Image (tube, rainbow, N blue to C red):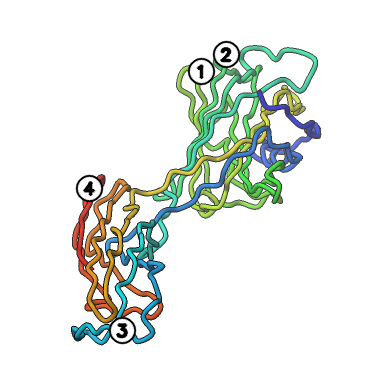
Amino acid sequence: MPRPTPRRRGLRTTTSLAASLVLAATMATTPAHSTSSTAVSAAADASSSTLLLEPDLPRAAETPATGESLELGSDQVRLEATRTTREGQVAPGRKPKIVRRSASLWLSRSVNFYPPDEQDVSRVSVNQDLKKAQIVFEASYYARPTAALNSAVFVYLGKWNAKQDSCAPQAVVGGTGHGPASDAILVDMDGEPLGTATRSMSGTTLRVTATGAGAKKSTYDCVFSDLVIIDSTDQQITAKESGADDFEAEIEKHPKFTFYSGDLHAAYPGKWNKVRISIRNDGNLTAKNVKLRLSGSKLKFKKKTIKVGTIKPGKSKAVNA
């Protein structure tokens, strides 16, 4: 369980409940990261992809190949066989996009008493759909909140620092357990709107849905949550907190290539040497119009670009170069 960092308590206010949400939301401090994780790296993706193979070939021949077969003379020496089996490089048509982010947060008490079940939340799940420009979180209460026993849940979205041990919030989504659909917010850390939000209750599960500019930002990579108790005088007390956690990214389906050449067999200077190259699509999307581009120092190729065509996920194609 992540160790929460203490936050400032809410202040007494006579403003509307929606305004109280903004006030409470913007008073959170930054929690520490419980565990660091490896950043998501995007693999190659494109409907049209070009593969670049640069084999480290022998350079014994002083004169570049001319494409003509040479008559062998007594002063010509047969070259030694050289292995060129290696992983190739991929030039993607475009970088794959993040399509979703998600996190599951467990809250622990930051006060020395147990909130009533109607005000108490154990777990918050957060999901961002970048195609829909939507952030949805669901909070599980122990009992359905009431007007007399009410609380608010806030989810903060931000960026890890360089050490990935502290999450700096950039936006907050929040909503009350009991109240009208409009008792929800999507704001920045100054309380300025970043979109619209609504809340609903199904059984003991609070669902807050936020849309707008703040919900379509793909760079949030950490998230944390607060539970704030609200009494009849709008006194607000932060009763539970989660530690900061990774806002896990889901990358769109894309091709991912690995490919190897065969051995470069022994050859004579000026003679063409055939190399077999195998290309495999280890991704989860069919790659179309795949092309293989060849280059190398002091080397000449019959074709610098070879059309490979379509490669389905998990399948390979081999070509001669």
Helix, strand or loop under label 2: loop
Of the pair 109 and 251, the residue shown nearer to us: 251
Mark 4 and mark 3 lie on one chain; the one further toward the N terminus is: 3
Of the pair 35 and 12, the residue shown nearer to us: 35
Mark 1 and mark 2 lie on one chain; the one further toward the N terminus is: 2
Residue 169 at x, y = what percent? 67, 46
**Marks 4 and 2, how far apart in space?**
50 Å
**Marks 2 and 3, how far apart in space?**
90 Å
Q: Is residue 179 left or right of residue 306?
A: right
Front disc: 2 or 3: 3
Residue kind at label 2, given as amino acid type: Tyr
Quadrant of image for the C terminus: bottom left
Residue kind at label 4, given as amino acid type: Lys
Q: Identify whether 75 is placed above or below 239.
A: below
Q: Which residue is mark 1?
A: 204
Q: Which residue is mark 4?
A: 315
Front disc: 4 or 2: 4
Q: Residues within 10 Å of mark 4 (few under 14, many from 20)?
A: few
Q: Which residue is mark 2?
A: 142
Q: Which residue is mark 3?
A: 75
Of the pair 285 and 216, the residue shown nearer to us: 285
Mark 4 and mark 2 lie on one chain; the one further toward the N terminus is: 2
Mark 2 and mark 3 lie on one chain; the one further toward the N terminus is: 3
